[in-house]
């Protein structure tokens, strides 16, 4: 007579087979949707948005449960379809594309899946794509995408992002363009991205980063000086009344956050020398 445990195992196996069959069928269907709707029109945007949402869910499940599902999309150049759509669309569809990419990279557990996604350079092309960053929603998803990628950086993955022979590093270059954004969320994200980049130990990359971030680091120190002066003026002025205490707290918090950021940069040897020299020239001379 079948035990309860063996019956449960048999049911679980049957359920898994059914789930896998459905996922395989859905994978083929979703790939077909991308292929059939290669040209974006008003009439197929909704279909593509729903397909992109489903792709994110299936890929994450495949990464964590069955690699063949993930492999299916990679073999059929999923990211090349994404790029094709991006080049045609600048609104809601690009928001969904970036959201899908965020979900995939934030939830990916296996390094082999990550290597497959990064190996064909499509990710760098997506980073360099000229999105409409005046669209607040696109900007939010784009900077989140860059930040998610930066958390995947290590000595093994850095070469997917930095091309030493051509000195190309889209993740760094595009992030630096946003460091003085009006949006505090974007500025904070850029700081995290820069920290994640400079902490990677790679000799070839370090020299490029040191040279490329010189102007940025100069602006960081200049920003520190300006914030300190602004705070001093605010404290001494008539503006420093009870009604403005919240503004004072905000200014103090901003200055403390910047000091913490600089302290973290100083912990990185490649950044410490440049920052120390800049600090000396700004505060002493």
Image (spheres, helix red, strand yellow):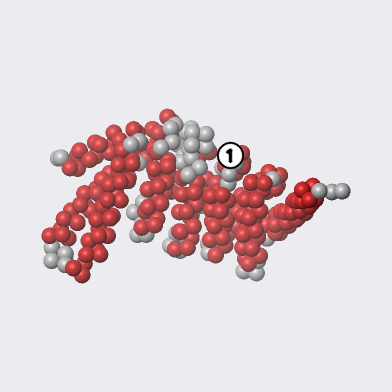
27 vs 34, nearest the viewer: 27
Locate residue 111 relative to residue 193 in the image: left or right: right
Badge count: 1
In the image, what residue occupies the spot 58% across and 46% down? Answer: 108
Q: Position of residue 72 (x, y in %)?
A: 70, 47
- In the image, is residue 151 above or below residue 49? above
Q: Residue furthest right?
A: 1
In the image, what residue occupies the spot 33% across and 40% down? Answer: 265
Secondary structure found at label 1: helix
Please give the residue where the numbered disc 1 appears in the rendered image: 111
- In the image, is residue 13 above or below residue 245? above
Does any portion of residue 44 appear in the rendered image?
yes
Disc 1 crowd, CA 10 A, few/some/many (<14, 14-19, 20+): few
- In the image, is residue 175 above or below residue 279? below
Q: Position of residue 119 (x, y in %)?
A: 59, 39
Q: Position of residue 102 (x, y in %)?
A: 53, 53
The quarter of the picture where the C terminus appears is top left
Locate residue 261 relative to residue 34 in the image: left or right: left
In the image, what residue occupies the spot 30% across and 35% down? Answer: 272
Q: Position of residue 273 (x, y in %)?
A: 29, 33
In the image, what residue occupies the spot 17% across and 42% down? Answer: 283
Does any portion of residue 28 appear in the rendered image?
no
60 vs 101, nearest the viewer: 60
């Amino acid at each position: 007579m079948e035990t309860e445990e063996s019956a449960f195992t048999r049911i679980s196996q049957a359920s898994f087979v059914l789930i896998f069959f459905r996922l395989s069928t859905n994978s083929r269907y979703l790939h077909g949707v991308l292929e059939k709707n290669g040209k974006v029109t008003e009439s197929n945007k909704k279909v593509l948005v729903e397909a992109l949402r489903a792709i994110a869910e299936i890929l994450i499940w495949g990464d964590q449960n069955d690699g063949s599902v993930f492999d299916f999309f990679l073999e059929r150049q999923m990211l090349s379809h994404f790029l094709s759509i991006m080049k045609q669309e600048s609104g809601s569809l690009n928001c969904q594309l970036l959201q899908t990419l965020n979900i995939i990279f934030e939830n990916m557990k296996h390094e082999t899946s990550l290597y497959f996604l990064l190996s064909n350079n499509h990710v760098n092309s997506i980073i360099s794509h000229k999105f409409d960053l005046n669209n607040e929603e696109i900007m939010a998803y784009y900077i989140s995408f860059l930040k998610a990628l930066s958390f995947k950086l290590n000595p093994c993955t850095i070469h997917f992002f930095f091309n030493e022979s051509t000195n190309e590093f889209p993740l760094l270059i595009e992030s630096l363009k946003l460091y003085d954004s009006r949006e505090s969320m974007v500025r904070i994200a850029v700081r995290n991205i820069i920290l994640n980049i400079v902490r990677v130990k790679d000799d070839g990359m370090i020299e490029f980063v040191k040279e490329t971030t010189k102007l940025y680091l100069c602006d960081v120190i200049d920003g520190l000086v300006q914030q300190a002066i602004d705070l001093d003026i605010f404290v001494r002025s008539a503006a420093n009344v009870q009604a403005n205490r919240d503004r004072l707290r905000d200014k103090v918090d901003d200055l403390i956050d910047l000091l913490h950021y600089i302290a973290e940069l100083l912990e990185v040897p490649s950044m410490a020398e440049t920052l120390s020299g800049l600090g000396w020239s700004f505060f002493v001379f």
